[in-house]
Image (tube, rainbow, N blue to C red):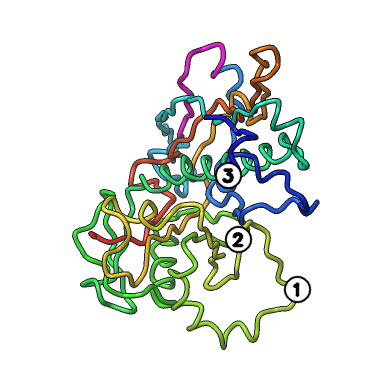
């Protein structure tokens, strides 16, 4: 199927008796999950040494240092090295079109297709990055599924508790305490980040309206979708991932009172880039009548720390 002149919805509407010169696109969000991935150059590893990309994880020393007595030797210790891996994968999409559509359209067909494909690429990258965030082994739920203050942590990536309460500011406090006591490093300065749908943050934002009245005027939002800061957490709203795919494997939380939210510090997901995303033109066929534009990317995403003891992402979760 190509973009055609003879079908209105496939291209014919790109010219009419009076068509606005303004190029208007459907509303599209920017990348939200991908901006928190640690980009790594995989050019050599990806193109000349197979499709696997590895990174080392270094432990703390095995024996803690301590005070020395005058005649004692400085103790010796070791540290361990583990390795994680992701697979370099091709990503892409294309839109074919005819020369007739390009020649007779008032709007530039290539400009429209470029914008449409760029929006598609943004969503694709966020879907791939989110799949790794979702794989975290750390999951929290409100105690008994209904507590408005306390949470329970599971370390195997799943929970048997049905989340039956909207996420509030006291939940955030409890989650931050867990993250700090697990020594999860801050993402930037002393702040963690949290990312979820706007509706998941609604109850919390209502709770914080009075607090926001005293927010310093000089506070600057620094990430795509950032809406504010509380308890050392900067909050990001996202809509690239649909609620059904954002939550538990079964989909959106069945009670509808909230959806998944990811709290995280530094060193979350690795992105190995062999060939950065780029736009490519199809070599015309049929004597130049059949044309096309594609976006292409060669790379991959992988959860950096998949062991619970070192995990950096905590998911607000539910059994259903």
Label located before the other in sequence (1 or 3): 3
Q: Look at the image and say whether residue 52 sits in the magenta stretch.
A: yes
Q: Secondary structure at mark 3?
A: helix
Which range of residues does the magenta coloring cover?
A: 46-57
- Residue 15 placed where, x, y %? 73, 44
Mark 1 or mark 3, whichever is nearer to me = 3
- Residue 309 placed where, x, y %? 35, 47
Mark 1 or mark 2, whichever is nearer to me = 2
Rendered image: mark on residue 119? none
Rendered image: mark on residue 218? 1
| Cα distance between the residues tagged 1 and 3 | 47 Å
Q: Is residue 200 above or below residue 129?
A: below
Label located before the other in sequence (2 or 3): 3
Rendering quarter of residue 42? top right
Q: Secondary structure at mark 2?
A: loop
User: Between residues 25 and 151, which one lies in front from this camera angle?
Assistant: 25
For label 3, the residue is 9
192 left or right, relative to 288: left
| Neighbourhood count class around disc 2 (C-alpha, 10 Å): few under 14, some 14–19, many 20 upward | some
Q: Is residue 214 above or below residue 241?
A: below
Label located before the other in sequence (1 or 2): 1
Is residue 92 visible in this depiction of the protein?
Answer: no
153 left or right, relative to 6: left
Total marks placed: 3
- Residue at the spot 43% in from the left edge and 73% down from the top edge: 173
Q: Is residue 74 above or below residue 163?
A: above
Rendering quarter of residue 212? bottom right
For label 2, the residue is 225
């Amino acid at each position: 199927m190509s973009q055609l002149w003879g079908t209105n919805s496939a291209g014919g509407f790109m010219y009419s008796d009076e068509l606005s010169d303004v190029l208007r696109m459907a509303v599209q969000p920017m990348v939200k999950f991908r901006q928190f991935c640690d980009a790594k150059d995989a050019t050599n590893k990806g193109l000349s040494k197979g499709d696997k990309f590895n990174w080392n994880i270094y432990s703390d020393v095995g024996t803690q240092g301590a005070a020395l007595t005058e005649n004692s030797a400085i103790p010796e210790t070791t540290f361990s090295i583990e390795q994680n891996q992701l697979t370099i994968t091709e990503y892409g999409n294309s839109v074919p079109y005819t020369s007739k559509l390009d020649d007779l359209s008032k709007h530039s067909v290539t400009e429209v297709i470029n914008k449409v494909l760029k929006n598609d690429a943004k969503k694709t990258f966020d879907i791939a990055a989110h799949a790794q965030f979702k794989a975290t082994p750390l999951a929290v739920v409100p105690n008994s599924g209904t507590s408005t203050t306390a949470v329970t942590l599971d370390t195997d990536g799943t929970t048997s508790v049905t989340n039956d309460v909207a996420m509030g500011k006291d939940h955030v406090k409890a989650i931050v305490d867990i993250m700090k006591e697990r020594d999860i490093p801050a993402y930037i300065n002393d702040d963690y980040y949290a990312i979820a749908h706007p509706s998941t943050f609604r109850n919390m934002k209502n709770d914080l309206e009075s607090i926001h009245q005293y927010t310093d005027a000089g506070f600057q939002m620094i990430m795509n979708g950032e809406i504010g800061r509380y308890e050392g957490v900067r909050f990001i709203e996202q809509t690239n991932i649909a609620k059904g795919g954002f939550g538990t494997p079964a989909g959106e939380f069945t009670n509808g009172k909230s959806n998944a939210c990811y709290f995280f510090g530094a060193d979350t997901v690795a992105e190995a880039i062999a060939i950065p995303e780029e736009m490519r033109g199809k070599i015309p066929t049929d004597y130049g009548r059949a044309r096309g534009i594609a976006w292409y990317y060669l790379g991959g995403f992988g959860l950096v720390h998949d062991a619970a003891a070192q995990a950096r992402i905590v998911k607000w979760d539910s059994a259903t």
